Amino acid sequence: MDSAMKRPVPERTPGRKTVTLGRVGNLETRLASSAHEVRQAQKLRYDIFYRELGAVPDPDTARTQRDADRYDPYCDHLLVVDRQAAPEGRIVGTYRMMFDRGARKAGGFYSQNEFDLSSLIDCKPRHRLMELGRSCILAPYRSKRTMELLWHGVWACALQNQIDIMFGCASFQGTDLQKVSPALAWLGKNVSLDNSGGPASRNREAFALSKCSNESNSRGRALALLPPVLKGYLRLGARVGSHAVIDRQFGTIDVLVVLRVADINARYLTHYGTDASRFAA
């Protein structure tokens, strides 16, 4: 989940032909192909982030009942659609993806509101970047196959755009540091990027993972506290930045996740197909 909501700007119409990236039973994954579908994805995000999880909306967000910010017009919106739930299908899951070209137009990546990405953006030779965020799935559809279908869509888009690095924020629900300190300490000790791609910026409520305490020193307890989506990233081969940020609006503690395509676990490449063929329509 993400933070730093700002007043939305007029949406651009994606204007792309609908292309199904993957299909399992009555579910399919594809990119939003119209402004209407983007608004429906924003409604789903609002229902989950604000109604279900208790984020605090600003006046515009409360009025529109859509989770929309200034970055949306510059992003691609991945959807999971239940083709049988409504005449035109029902959007039941979504992921937001921003590529370098969109970030240049938007004046930066969303994650730069919380983290210093200079080591990723200014690296030599330059890598192709894809930022992931705003992921959510409607409660009745929170199953392994829906998550796999979303990940299949992400992987297909990464291949199509020749992406080198995927990154984004992963969130712990709640802002009580003591409750999740063992997990944060474990991340800092075992999968941290140290000072590469992780120092927090533009946020006073940032702290180093190395300062967190895991008094029980229990690996099992630490792993049990990790959000499922973060566990998924780590299984793929991701690492995290050296700092975390408390997001008061969304009521979360955020860490920066960085996944280099070259580091993706070979087992998952085999599972989804090196050419994203596992669930190909």
Image: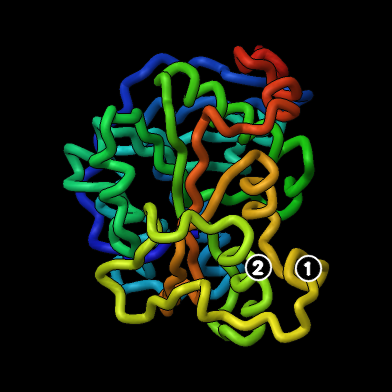
- Work out whether residue 40 can be spotted: no
The residue lying toward the viewer, choosing from 101 and 22, is 101
The quarter of the image holding the C terminus is top right
User: What residue is pinned by disc 1?
Assistant: 219
Q: Position of residue 244 (x, y in %)?
A: 46, 70
Q: Position of residue 247 (x, y in %)?
A: 43, 74
Circles 2 and 1: CB distance less than 8 Å?
A: yes
The label on residue 14 is none
Residue displayed at 32% across by 27% down: 14
- Work out whether residue 178 can be spotted: yes
User: What residue is pinned by disc 2?
Assistant: 186
The answer to whether 223 appears left or right of 8 in the picture is right
Q: CA distance from mark 2 to mark 1?
A: 7 Å
Q: Which image quadrant is residue 28 in?
A: top right
Q: Position of residue 134 (x, y in %)?
A: 48, 51
Label 2 crowd (10 A; few <14 / some 14-19 / many >=20)? many
Q: Position of residue 63 (x, y in %)?
A: 34, 67
Please determine whether, in this image, residue 148 is positioned above or below residue 247. above
Residue displayed at 63% across by 54% down: 230
Q: Spot the residue most to the right.
A: 220
The residue lying toward the viewer, choosing from 5 and 115, is 115
The answer to whether 170 appears left or right of 87 in the picture is left
- In the rendered picture of this protein, how many numbered marks are placed on residues? 2
Label 1 crowd (10 A; few <14 / some 14-19 / many >=20)? few
